[in-house]
Amino acid sequence: MTETRKYIESHKDEMIQLLSELVAIPSVQGEASDGCPFGAEPARALAIMLDKCREYGFDVENVDNYAGSADLGGEPALAILSHLDVVPAGEGWSSDPFTLTRDGDKLIGRGAIDDKGPAVAAVFALRAVRELGIPLKKGVRLIFGTNEENGSADLEYYRKKRSLPPMVFTPDGEYPVINVEKGMMRVYFSAAAPENVEIKAGTVINAVPASCRFSVVEALKDGPKMTFGTAEGTSAHASTPEKGENAITKFLAEHCKNVPLLSGLAELFPFGETDGKSCGLGFSDDISGRMTCVLSMLNTDGGRLRGGIDIRFPIDRTKAEISDIICGRLRAAGFDIDSCEGVEPHCTDGDSEFVQALLRVYERVTGDKGRCIAIGGGTYVHEIEGGVAFGAEFPDTDYHMHSPDEFITVSDLLKNAELMAEAIVELCS
C-alpha cells in the first residue's frame, strides 16, 4: 500500500463528512443575484469548499463566485478541475437526494459522482501530498467551478480573469483517460404547424425521447383519417442513441407519410437511423468513430411546429461543415432555423508525456491496462487545449449519474483520491 493510500484510508471519515456537507446543498443553478451569478446555492457550496481548503492550509481564492481555487506550491503547472453545481434531483429516488445516504459501500446523493465526490477526492489527494511532506518542484491548483451543468459560463469567466496551467485534467469523465471528444451541435428549427396536428415529444435536447403524444389528420384518397395516441420508445443519452429507441422517429414513420411537412421530417430522420446519413451526414473516422444525429424534440406550440436536434460529429469534421449540411436540408424541407450552435471537436495527443504519465499512474494503482478513449459526450475540459478527463468513473460501473440514486462507492472515492495524489506526484515532483 502506498503512503498516499495509507493517508487517504486514515482520513476516510473526514472525506465522507465533507461530501455529506456538500451534497446537503442543492447547488442547482438558480436566479442570479448580487455576487451570486448562478444563484445562492452554488455560491454556498463553493464557500464551504474554499473554507475547508483554507483550513487544510492551502492558498485559496474566490473569483467572484464563478469559480474558486486552492493552491499548493509555487506557480501552478497542473490544475485539477472539478465542479460543485449539480443537475436537478428529479423524481424516483429511494432516499432524500440532498442527504448523503450510505447503503453498504454506496454513498447515495445528488452530486456524489458528478462532481462533488471527485472534488472531495481531489482535495484529499492534495492534502495527502502536503501533509506527507512529498516534495514538489511544480505547483498544483485545484479549481472548483459552479456552472458546468449549464454551459460552463463559470470557466469562461474564470479564464478571462486567470490563466490556466499548462497541464489540466478533470475528474468529470471516465478512466483511464479521455483524450478525444466529438464536436457537438444543437439545432433548433420551426415552421408553421400543419392543420390538425398536435405533437408533444422531448423536453431536453440531449436525450433520446421515450414517448411522443400526438393527434394527426392524414389526407388520404378516401378521405381524411384522424389518428391519436402515444408512440413509445426507450430513452438514452444523445451521445449513445443506439442504446435507445426514438419515439419521435417511430411516430413519424408510422403516422406521417401523408402529412405535409412531417413526411419530409420522416425522410430526413428514418426510424432506427442514428448517424444522420439521410440528412447528408453519416460521417465517421478511425479515432472518434461514427457520428450521431438525434431528432430529440418535436412539439406544437402557438401554431408552430418546433424541433431540436442533437449532433455529435467526428474530429475530422468542422462545425461549419456540419451546420451547412443539416441547416440546408432542413430549409429544403420547409423549416426555419431558429438557432444552430456548437463546439468543435476536442483532441489531445495520446502520446504526449502528460497523457502517458496519467496512464502510468492508472496502471500502477489499479493493475489494469491504461488506454485512451474517445467519447461522444463532453467533459469539463472540452474547450481547454491539451486538457483530458482522468476519472472519476471506473469502467463497467453505472453510477446513475444525472439519474435517481446517483452514487459513488466508498472504495471508489478513496481510489480516486489515491489516483489523483499519485498523478500529482508523477507530474509535479
Image (cartoon, rainbow, N blue to C red):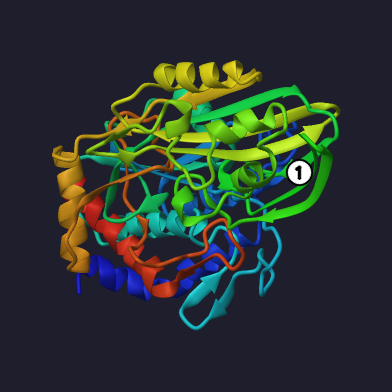
* Amino acid type assigned to the residue bearing label 1 in the image: Lys
Q: Specify whether 271 is left or right of 350.
A: right
Q: Quadrant of residue 149?
A: top right
Q: Is residue 44 visible?
A: yes
Q: Specify whether 356 is left or right of 404.
A: left
Is 230 in front, or is 72? 230
Q: Specify whether 222 is left or right of 343.
A: right
Q: Image quadrant for the N terminus? A: bottom left
Residue 400 in the image: x percent, y percent? 52, 63
Furthest residue in direction front, as rendered: 222
Q: Quadrant of residue 258?
A: top right
Is 420 in front, or is 389? 389
**Number of numbered discs visible in the structure rendering:** 1
Residue 92 in the image: x percent, y percent? 68, 67
Q: Quadrant of residue 327?
A: top right
Is 249 in front, or is 259? 259
At horizontal 64% and vertical 44% (from top left) the residue drawn is 248
Quick check: 289 above or below 125? above
Residue 379 in the image: x percent, y percent? 42, 42
At horizontal 56% and vertical 42% (from top left) the residue drawn is 206
In the picture of the structure, the residue carrying the numbered disc 1 is 200
At horizontal 30% and vertical 70% (from top left) the residue drawn is 7
Which structural element holds mark 1?
strand
At horizontal 70% and vertical 39% (from top left) the residue drawn is 39
Is 82 in front, or is 142? 82
Residue 29 in the image: x percent, y percent? 67, 42
